[in-house]
Image (cartoon, rainbow, N blue to C red):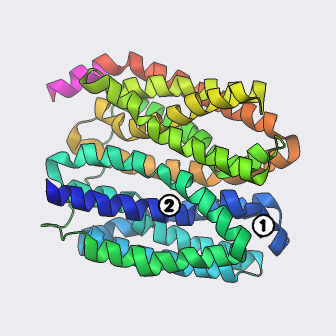
Amino acid sequence: MQKNLIAFAVLAITQVISWGAVGILPVLASSIAGDLGIALPTVFFGASTMFVTMGLAAPAAGRAFRRYGARRVMAAGAALVACGLTLIAASVTTLMFLAAWVIMGAAGAMLLTTGAYIYLSDFAEEQARSLIGTLMLVTGLSSALFFPVTAFLASTIGWRGAVLTYAGVMLLVVAPLVFGGLPETATAPKAAEPNPAPSSKGSSVFWLIVVAVALNSFVTFGSEAICVELFRAFDMSMTQAVGLAALVGVFRVGGRVIDVLGGRRWDGLSTAQISGAMIPLGLLLLCIGRAELWSIGGYLLLFGAGSGAFAVARATMPLVFYRKADYAAAMSSIALPLNLTNALAPPALAALLTTLGPSAVLGLLAALSCAAFLLIVQLGRLREPAAVTQAER
């Protein structure tokens, strides 16, 4: 138990720092755009490049996890993130900037999220599921912690100095902490079996999950990527916008309460239904009230907590319909469209924000999250037959 807690603490610290280091664009995008003389959507295309590369590099990273173990691969990924950040800080052209994000994507496939889950599943055994769920929410703190830190660093040593600072932290703190702080696992992770050919009903369930998760990921990840610029479009100061963006991260972590309140009475789909309804309501409140105190409060409570709870549901919802033995294969199949969606969201929303304004962005996000909620409702209608089928297996 103590070893599990130590491993979890190391993963929590390093994952929060790592996501904070790669999530610099919401705060630094306007400074980078002005310095490099490029459009804001082009800057956010850096994040898109990272996520596309992460998706494409995932199979190779998976083989590396199995061959060398998650601990070694994650430590190498942390060092590679430092290289990518250094190149970002040195960028003087758009090509250099985007090439740096390709490196960040390859490093992210080695370091971010998946490697941590693989390590926990192998090391923590029966406690892995609860630790993975908790880790998902803890990493939500990265924006709350690092948005203000990044803004402070940028205001004192410039955006290039801030990025170089994070490069040093990744190389000198995160990489050694992962390699030296995580205990060696007893066995290397096993390769996930490929997904069997689904039945007609199984295929329907799978695609409902994929589309619902992808739509909500577009909404939650995309809004996080542009949140500072979105709030500034409501005539907020930079300090106010960064502070509000950080509060969204805090409420996102607080969304864990929704899942905890259900206890054993709820499954991942129940959490998805409740949180899936909260997300569009929060967006609509902000769209209607804009910078009014009541609308911001409602947005924080509904969207912030709802998106945090949905982060848990995204990982646990497939367990309602798939056997545990098929869970890894299902999640692997979901990973690529999820990464592609995450890649599309920041530049698309940034372009919409600069052309049509914040109300258009919030309206689109609300519509997409409503569509995702309807798909989750449809999944609820398929829950009982799927549960019976699973029990018969």
Dominant SS of magenta comes to helix
> Looking at this view, is 292 or 370 the one in front?
292
Residue 19 position within the rendered picture, expressed as x and y whole percent measured from the top left: 50, 60
Which image quadrant for residue 323? top left
Q: Secondary structure at mark 2?
A: helix
The residue stretch that appears in magenta: 385-392
Q: Residue 166 magenta-drawn?
A: no
Which image quadrant for residue 192? bottom left
Circle 2: is it few (<14), some (14-19), or many (20+) Cα within 10 Å? Answer: many
> Looking at this view, is 185 or 59 the one in front?
185
The residue located at (39%, 31%) in the rendering is 257
Which image quadrant for residue 289? top right
Q: Which mark is residue 31?
A: 1
Circle 1: is it few (<14), some (14-19), or many (20+) Cα within 10 Å? Answer: some
Q: Say whether residue 175 is left or right of residue 336.
A: left
Q: Count numbered badges in the picture.
A: 2
Q: CA distance from mark 1 to mark 2?
A: 20 Å
Q: Which mark is residue 19?
A: 2
Q: Residue 390 magenta-drawn?
A: yes
Q: Amino acid at mark 2?
A: Trp
